[in-house]
Image (cartoon, rainbow, N blue to C red):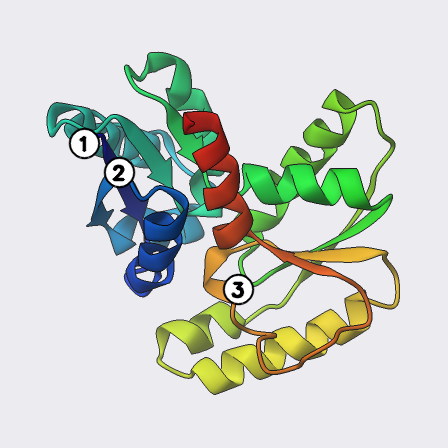
Amino acid sequence: MPRLALVHTVPALIERFRPLVAQALPDWQSYNVTDESLLQDTIRDGRPSGTTVHRLASYVSGAVDAGADAIIVTCSSLGEAADALRPLTQVPLFRIDRGMAAAAAAQAQRVGVLATLATTLGPTSRLIRAEAASAGRDCIVVDRLCDGAFAQLMAGDRVGHDMAVRAAFDDLATQVDLVVLAQASMAGALASVGSTAVPVLTSPELGVSHIAAQLA
C-alpha cells in the first residue's frame, strides 16, 4: 500500500483532511506531520525565510526516509516553498491550493482571494494568475485580507473567526465573480451560510481531488 505524508502547520487540519484523503485515496495509507512554528515564523518574517524553507525541506526529506510515496504541504503560506522543493524531492510533492487555483482560473474572470494571513495573499494570487496564464485565460485577481481573524482562530474563537470571514466575504463578493478562501483553515467559515452571492472555492476538497487525479 503506497504511503502519503501530509505536512501541516495548523494541528486542527489533521481531522479536516483525514476523511478527504480516505475518500479520494482509499488505497493509500496516510500519516500526518505538524509543526506550528513553520507558520509562526513565516508570519513573523512576512514570508518563508531561508531557515523556514530549510526546515520544511527537512520534513519533506524525513517523509521520504519514512517511506512516503507522495507528500502534501497543506499550508498555503508555504505553497511557493513547496514548489521550490519539488525538483529536489524524490517523490511527488504537492501544495494543497493548486487544485483550487486551477478551478478558480477556469471558472471566473474576476476572482476574489480572501485570506486571514498576509503571507497567503501573495502566493495564492500568483498561483491563480499562473494557472490562468497556463490555460490561456485572462484573470483579474482582487485581494482581501481579513486581518485579525487568524489570531482569533488560534485563540480558540472559531465563532469570531467565522463571523469576520463572513463579513469580509460579503464585501468582496460584490466586486468579483467567484471567491476563493485562501487557507485550508478558512474552509468551514461559510458552512452555515447556505447559498452565497457568488461561488466559493476552498482548498481541502479541491486540493485532495486534484492530487488524487495526479496520483491515479
Q: Is residue 127 above or below residue 90?
A: below
Label 1 close to label 2 by CB (< 8 Å): yes
Which residue is disc 1 drawn over? 1
- Residue labelled with disc 3: 187
Instruction: Give me the C-alpha separation between circle 1 and circle 2.
Output: 6 Å
Among numbered discs 3 and 2, the one appearing first in the sequence:
2
**Left or right: 12 as drawn, with respect to 30:** right
Q: State the residue at coordinates (75%, 61%).
A: 199
**x and y percentages locating residue 83 in the rendered image:** 46, 26
Across and down, in percent, residue 197 comes to 82, 72
Location of the C terminus by quadrant is top left
**Which amino acid lies under the numbered mark 1 shown in the image of this protein?**
Met
Rounded to the nearest angstrom, the CA distance separating label 3 from label 2 is 24 Å
Q: Position of residue 185 (x, y in %)?
A: 46, 62
Q: Residue furthest front?
A: 27
Give the label on residue 28, or none. Answer: 2
* Mark 2 element type: loop
